Structure formats: structure tokens, C-alpha cells
Image (spheres, rainbow, N blue to C red):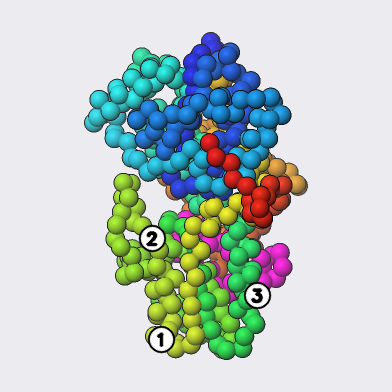
């Protein structure tokens, strides 16, 4: 294929993760060998597509200049830095057929900077941006390549075995749950502890709370995922039954738990505000269940919301996750150079006795605006826990400890 010569731009979108910057590092690492050949400049969008629209771009070739050794040191520090180093956004692009002027203005920016390569690191909603931009460019005379690079702690993108960012979040949740369970076990007073974990529509993160069960033999007594309708009566029966056996009951629940009628369990404690994609801001499931247990059972009860540390706890990231996240970025960059566009990079788990992965290019339509749920075979019959098969699937993704640089006793963070 004839080489497409021009600038490249990369951005980050949606909720950040502790591994999203590793994917950015992979793109940068892939671009430098092409500097002055295929790639004339490498720009970073500040705050995702919003930065592109406002021309708020940073010269990444300039930021990472120096010897190869110096650059690799900076990229390593970037990989171990949580959150989105370029900033993020949650902007929903209009449907191309309904707002031709918006896309013409984007093309004008691309032309102004001679941008021929567009890389977007994000989850479900971010892939919607990749899909819409790709669709518009098909009918445009401007030659350009657009690649989606997956990331989401929710692990809910279809077409890939798992998503970059999930392994590190799962590792934090599993470790934190083990610590909570051991802390709760020191008393003999009957008590219930409810731990609320992120996950609007898919329960992968909540499932990871049970990982210690196959590692060290401790785990939450119950695990409730959004894949199953939540039944309050059955929940109270579960809790009472377990309290009859032992004084300390620990429960993991997804923030996205819904009743059979579709209402969120925590709806009474939520603001009702929605984002630009129509998603309600969730939280409060644990608190709602805490109030119910207190009212119906009367024992000591507390709820814990793990909240943002699930996606920014860079001190306990998975080396496997960081390595794969960086490889996704570099593979995606090379795929674009080879001529791919309108695509997302997929992680394929190889059928080896020892865990390993490979990567491939998928059409963006296989991932955009779709959700990958925890399969039925990973959930027990009563719907109040996950199977060992589920945990064996997750376990390889949390393995390995990166060599983190500390400064003044805390992890060092790289700033672009």
C-alpha cells in the first residue's frame, strides 16, 4: 500500500484508568521510528476531541525529545502514571448525516495541521467517536486513518478478550477486598459490610472482588452483579442465613444493580443527573442496602464505596495489564501505518497452557455502542456469587508487579 505521509494525533477519552497512559506511551513509542518518514509530527489532544476542536494540541515529539535512552525513561514513567496525562472528556459527536458542518470543521483542523492519523484511547462511548468519524471520512475526499485503542476498567467492550485497564482495577479490588475481609473478621459482634464496586451494566469488576477465594481462601460471602435482576427479599434471606453461621458478613455489590422493573437499587440516593451519553451518575447502591439491612435486620452495618481508587491506584497496578496496554498502543499505531482505518485493536487470549495474548484489527462496528456482559456460566444459579471458572479467567490479568519509581515516599507521576 502507498504510504500516507502526514501528522498523527492521539487523544484520551472517557473515564481514566491506571493503565491508559501505557497505551499512550505505546503510540508514542511506535511513532518515533516513523518520525520524518511517514509521520511529520505527533500531536496530543488536550481533553480528547474537545482539544482537537479548540486546537489545544501538544507536540509530543518535542515533549519526548532526547536520546533513545532518555525517551524510554520518560515513557516508562508515563506508563506508571495514573489518569489521562493528556486530559479527558465526555463529548458525544453528532450523527454525521445530521451535522455535516461539524465534521467539515474537524476536517479543516486536520488539513491545517496535515493530520492523517487519528488515534483515540477510550471505552464504549469513545469508540462511538471513532465510528462516527470513520463513517464520515468514508464519504470525504480527505485521506485519513482512524484507529480506536480500547481502555476501560469495566471490561465491557465486545470483540476483545479483555480491555486494558481492567486487570489493574481488578487487582486493586481483589487486594482491597482481602484487606476489608480480614479487618472485619477481628470482631465477634454481628455485622454486615457492603462494598460497592463500579460497573454500570457489566459486573466484571464486582466479580474480581471474589478473586482471593482461589488465591488465599478468603472472599466476600456474596457477590451481586448487574447481569441478574436484584431481589431484595432474596438478598435479606441470604444475609440472615449467613449471619446465623458467623458474625461477620461481607458483600460485594455492583453500583449498577437493578430491580426486575429496571430501577436502580440505589436510585433513591442518586441525583438523577445524566451525562451527554444519557448515562445516570451512579453511586449509592451500597448505602441503600445498608439502610435496608439496618431497618430489616437491625445488626451493625456499614457500606464502603471504593469509588475512584478503582481506576487510579497506580501503586498496585498489574504488570500484565501495563504491558498489554502499551502493546495495544504500539500495535494500533503500526496497524494504521499499514493502512488500517475505521478499526479497533482486539486482544486475543492464545490457547496455550501458559497465559499469553496476541493482537488483531477489528472493524469498529464490532465494538462501538455495544456491551459485553459477564456470561451466565460465570454466575452461580442463585445469582449471589461468581464461579471459580470466572475467577480463573480474571486471575492472569492481575499478575505481575511493575518496578515503580518512588519520590519522597510516594509514587512518581509523569506530567505532559
Neighbour class for label 3 at 10 Å: few (<14), some, many (≥20)?
few
Q: Residue at x 68, y 50 (%)?
A: 406
Neighbour class for label 2 at 10 Å: few (<14), some, many (≥20)?
many
Which image quarter is the N terminus in?
A: top right
Mark 1 vs mark 3: in front: 3
Q: Residue at x 48, y 38 (%)?
A: 86
Q: How many marks?
A: 3
To which residue does mark 1 refer? 296
Specify whether residue 29 is painted magenta.
no
> In this rendering, would 46 be left or right of 91?
right
> Most extreme residue toward the right, as rendered?
353
For the question of whether residue 286 can be seen, the reply is yes
Looking at the picture, how far across and down is residue 215, in whole percent? 71, 64
What residue range appears in magenta?
A: 202-230
Neighbour class for label 1 at 10 Å: few (<14), some, many (≥20)?
few
Q: Quadrant of residue 89?
A: top left
Local SS, label 3: helix
To which residue does mark 3 refer? 182
For the question of whether residue 246 can be seen, the reply is no
Q: Quadrant of residue 387?
A: bottom right
| N-terminal-most mark, 1 or 3 | 3
| N-terminal-most mark, 2 or 3 | 3
Q: Alpha carbon of mark 1 to alpha carbon of mark 3: how far?
A: 26 Å
Viewer-side residue, 289 vs 349: 289
Looking at the picture, how far across and down is residue 305, in whole percent? 48, 66
> Most extreme residue toward the top, as rendered?
2
To which residue does mark 2 refer? 282
Local SS, label 1: helix
> In this rendering, would 278 be left or right of 39?
left
Looking at the picture, how far across and down is residue 39, in whole percent? 54, 18
Viewer-side residue, 73 vs 220: 73
Amino acid at each position: 500500500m502507498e504510504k500516507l505521509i502526514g501528522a498523527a494525533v492521539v487523544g484520551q477519552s472517557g473515564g481514566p484508568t491506571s493503565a491508559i497512559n501505557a497505551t499512550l506511551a505505546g503510540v508514542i513509542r511506535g511513532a518515533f521510528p516513523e518520525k520524518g518518514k511517514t509521520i511529520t509530527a505527533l500531536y496530543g489532544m488536550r481533553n480528547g476531541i474537545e482539544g482537537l476542536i479548540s486546537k489545544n494540541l501538544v507536540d509530543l515529539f518535542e515533549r519526548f525529545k532526547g536520546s533513545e535512552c532518555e525517551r524510554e525513561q520518560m515513557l516508562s514513567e508515563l506508563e506508571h502514571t495514573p489518569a489521562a496525562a493528556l486530559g479527558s472528556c465526555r463529548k458525544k459527536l453528532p450523527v454525521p448525516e445530521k451535522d455535516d458542518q461539524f465534521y467539515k470543521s474537524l476536517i479543516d483542523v486536520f488539513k491545517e495541521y496535515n493530520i492523517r492519523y487519528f488515534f483515540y484511547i477510550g471505552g464504549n462511548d469513545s469508540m462511538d467517536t471513532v465510528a462516527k468519524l470513520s463513517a464520515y471520512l468514508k464519504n470525504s475526499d480527505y485521506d485519513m486513518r482512524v484507529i480506536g485503542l480500547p481502555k476501560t476498567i469495566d471490561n465491557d467492550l465486545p470483540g476483545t478478550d479483555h480491555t486494558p485497564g481492567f486487570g489493574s482495577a481488578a487487582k486493586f479490588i481483589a487486594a482491597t477486598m482481602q484487606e476489608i475481609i480480614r479487618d472485619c473478621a477481628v470482631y465477634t459482634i454481628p455485622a454486615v459490610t457492603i462494598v460497592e464496586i463500579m460497573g454500570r451494566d457489566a459486573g466484571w469488576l464486582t466479580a474480581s472482588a471474589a478473586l482471593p477465594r482461589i488465591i488465599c481462601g478468603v472472599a466476600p460471602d456474596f457477590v451481586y452483579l448487574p447481569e441478574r435482576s436484584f431481589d431484595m427479599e432474596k438478598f435479606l434471606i441470604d444475609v440472615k442465613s449467613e449471619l446465623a453461621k458467623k458474625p461477620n458478613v461481607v458483600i460485594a455489590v455492583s453500583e449498577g444493580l437493578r430491580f426486575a422493573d429496571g430501577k436502580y437499587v440505589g436510585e433513591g440516593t442518586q441525583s438523577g443527573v445524566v451525562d451527554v451519553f444519557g448515562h445516570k451518575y451512579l453511586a449509592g447502591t451500597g448505602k441503600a442496602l445498608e439502610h435496608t439491612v439496618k431497618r430489616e435486620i437491625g445488626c451493625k452495618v456499614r457500606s464502603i464505596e471504593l469509588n475512584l481508587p478503582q481506576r487510579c491506584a497506580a501503586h498496585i497496578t498489574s504488570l500484565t495489564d501495563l504491558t498489554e496496554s502499551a502493546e495495544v498502543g504500539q500495535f494500533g499505531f503500526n496497524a494504521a501505518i499499514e493502512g488500517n482505518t475505521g478499526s479497533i485493536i482486539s486482544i486475543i487470549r492464545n490457547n496455550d497452557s501458559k497465559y499469553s495474548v496476541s493482537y488483531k484489527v477489528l472493524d469498529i462496528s464490532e465494538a462501538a455502542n455495544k456491551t459485553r456482559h459477564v456470561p451466565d456460566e460465570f454466575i452461580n444459579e442463585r445469582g449471589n456469587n461468581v464461579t471459580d471458572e470466572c475467577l480463573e479467567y480474571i486471575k492472569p490479568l492481575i499478575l505481575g508487579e511493575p518496578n515503580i519509581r518512588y519520590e519522597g515516599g510516594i509514587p512518581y507521576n509523569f506530567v505532559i
